[in-house]
Image: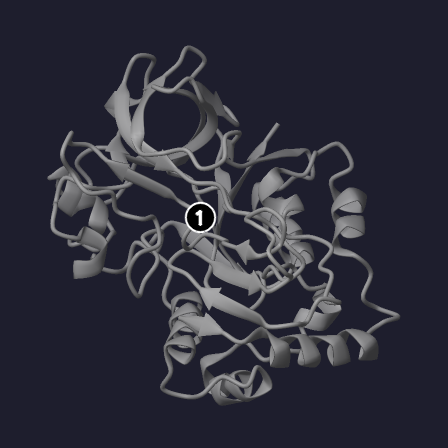
Amino acid sequence: MEFHILPIITFLMLVVATNADAALPPAFYWKSKLPTTPMPKAITDLLQPDWKEEKDTSVDVGKGGVNVGVEKGNQGPGDGTDVNVGGGDGGVNVHTGPKGKPVHVGVGPHSPFDYNYAASETQLHDDPNVALFFLEKDLHHGTKLNLHFTIYYTSNGDATFLPRSVSDSIPFSSNKVNDVLNKFSIKDGSDEAKTVKNTINECEGPSIKGEEKRCVTSLESMVDFATTKLGSNNVDAVSTEVTKKDNELQQYTMAPGVKRLGEDKASVVCHKENYPYAVFYCHKSETTKAYSVPLEGADGSRVKAVAVCHTDTSKWNPKHLAFQVLKVQPGTVPVCHFLPQDHVVFVPK
């Protein structure tokens, strides 16, 4: 499914011009609020858009993000021809069985990180053993998992962060969804429109008991939410990093060095949403633990993965993807998952 980006570019350029005095680069805000916190790659990849290349540009809304294709001659991936964020190349494919088919992180109408929803048939594919999720008891050196980490390519047309003064001027509400569609020249009833509506509906949906959530439409709002909920500006921000391009489905082994992030304190996790510009579903829970997990692939490649474990799943939808794949019941055992590359977790230092 494709978002045609030319009308999006035109609209955003007009908004940015109108708000030029107030639209300071989001990176400045990060540095002012988090001067000792390096930006993770998931954030830096979504900064400083360049809208000058407009020829034959289209946006493909993938399963885990927004994909952008920019025709610029015969360039290859990484040169601006094909950009994939979260959908085709921005997530993690996982299966636990030797013959299973991989399931992508963001398959289906709802994010697997919104725990109010049941798994869709698309998410499950044809193999119930295929999943992103695993049990906390397996989070240790020596555990082997069949994973497919893919790396997305950044380009001028990517679904980047907008300055807060710009994003705040754009409607983001189910009550004004027609205004959103009109502003981005999206036809109502199209796949693109369904994607926009799904994202807004998830953002407006109820929180799980014990969880505080907010969809942020700017980097500034993400920083404010994370620091406010954690009660401090002294935080670390981390994301999964894959060093090798075009790696294949293979067996990864958890290497020595699995460690807890943030000790015994709460964390804020922000998941990239499907939208024409960068929107993140952020939530804070006292029953969430974050881990740094070094992985070594069978081909020698290495991944600095981030895993999140949920110690209380009693309020999740009983038909959620995790339960169907792991064959466990809500609230019985801690459930973990790796974070895709375009997701971020904030933890107190």
Which residue is disc 1 drawn over? 89
Relative depth, front residue between 318 and 80 = 80
Image position of 312 with respect to 208: above or below: above
Residue at horizontal 67 percent and vertical 39 percent from the top: 39
Where 128 falls versus 138 (above or below)? below
Q: Is residue 145 visible?
A: yes
Left or right placement of residue 141 versus residue 196 in this view:
left
Quadrant location of the C terminus? top right
**Residue 309 shows in the view:** no
Q: Is residue 252 above or below residue 187?
A: above
In which image quadrant can residue 312 be found? top left
Report which quarter residue 128 is drawn in: top left
User: Which structural element holds mark 1?
Assistant: loop
Q: Nearer the viewer, residue 321 or 185?
A: 185
Kindly identify the residue that appears in the image at 14 percent across and 39 percent down: 129
User: Residue 22 or 14: which is nearer the viewer?
Assistant: 14
Q: Is residue 223 left or right of residue 281?
A: right
Left-right relation of 232 to 90: right
Spot occupied by residue 230 in the image (x, y as percentages of width and height): 58, 41
Q: Measuring from the top left, give residue 301's x and y in whole percent.
A: 44, 22
Residue 102, image x, y percentages: 24, 43
Q: Residue at x 44, y 37 (%)?
A: 246
- Which kind of residue does numbered mark 1 sit on? Asp
**Across the whole image, how many numbered discs are drawn on residues?**
1
